[in-house]
Each structure stands twice: as C-alpha cells, then as structure tokens.
Amino acid sequence: MQKNMIPLEEHIRLWQTLANPSATAEEKEQAQDQLWDARLEMKERELSKTFYHQEEAQVFPVVFPEMSQIPLRLWETQPTEIRKKLSAQLTVYLTFWEEDDADDPWRAVERMMKEANLHPWGGLDEILREKNEEESERNACEIWGNPYREEDEEQN
C-alpha cells in the first residue's frame, strides 16, 4: 500500500456512509470530502511522478549526453549490476595499486579505472589516445628536435 493512502476498511466505510440513506447530510458531505481529498492526493502524486519522469527524460540526455545510454533509474531496476561493477572496481583497486599512488590517490583511481576499462567515458580508448599522443610527441621530437633541453640532459 502506498504512503498517505486511505486504508481499504476506511475507504469501504466512507462509501457505505455515502450509500446509507439514514446517514445525515453532514456525515455524507464529510465522507465525500475525504474520498475527494484522497482521490486528488493520489492524482497529484501520479502527476508529479510522471512530470518528473518526463523532465528527467528530456533534461538528462541534454545535460549528460555521454550518460544517455544508462537507464535513468538504474539503481531501482538493476541493483545487482551496480554491485558487480562496484566489486569489480574494488578488485581493480586492490590489484593494481602501486607505490606512487599514495602520493596522488585521485590520479591513481583514474588510472586504475582506465586500466580496468571501467571509465564511463574512456577505458581502452583513453589509454590508446594517451599512447598515441606519446608516440606522436616522440616522433615530433625525433624529427624536429626536443624543445626541452633539460629532458635531453637528464637522459644522458
């Protein structure tokens, strides 16, 4: 039963009061008001729920386009999927933690999520892009010479 709804017994009693010919006009009016209030409250709750669902459906993809593939109420519909993902992340953190990660835990988390392919906007693509950038930078250094003399001195 939904919250703030009239119990079934009360609902039946109100309708019996309305149908009862010996009930006073004041009792009938009070029963009618209670039924009407309950109906309005239920209708209002349904309208607000559909309104918010429509609002989410319209606004969410515009504001977060990369997340439009994820169902809106993921936590309600698929809690086991989220649990699996969280346990996978935890496994990754425990497996891939390195000594340098203690200095900058946020960078460590980002790196580990990329390595585990759990990054919502990257994963393998992000790793490949970074490798391509490093490769193109190395090629540019070979062709044009390294503009940073300090790095050359450190390598020698």
Image: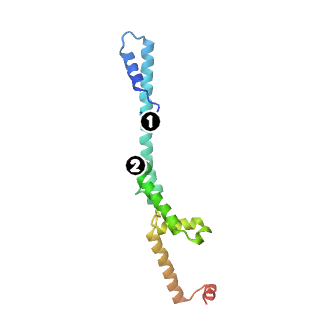
**What's the residue at 44%, 48% (across, down)?**
56
Q: Secondary structure at mark 2?
A: helix
Question: Identity of the amino acid at label 2?
Answer: Thr
Q: CA distance from mark 1 to mark 2?
A: 21 Å
Q: Which residue is identified by label 1?
A: 45
Could you say which is closer to the camera, residue 10 or residue 130?
10
Instruction: Judge by depth and name the residue closer to the eye, 37 or 74.
Output: 74
Q: Is residue 29 above or below residue 99?
A: above
At a point 45% along the width and 58% down the height, the residue shown is: 85
Q: Position of residue 119 (x, y in %)?
A: 47, 64
- Single out the residue that lies furthest toward the top: 22
Q: Residue 95, percent across and down?
A: 50, 67
Q: Is residue 4 above or below residue 13?
A: below
Within-10-Å neighbours for mark 1: few <14, some 14–19, many 20+: few
The spot of residue 94 in percent (x, y) is 52, 65
Say which mark, if any, is on residue 77: 2
Q: Earlier in the sequence, mark 1 or mark 2?
A: 1
- Pinpoint residue 82: horizontal percent, then vertical percent: 44, 55
Residue drawn at point x = 36 percent, y = 13 percent:
20
Q: Depth check: give the residue in front, 33 or 71.
A: 71
The amino acid type found where label 1 is placed reads Arg
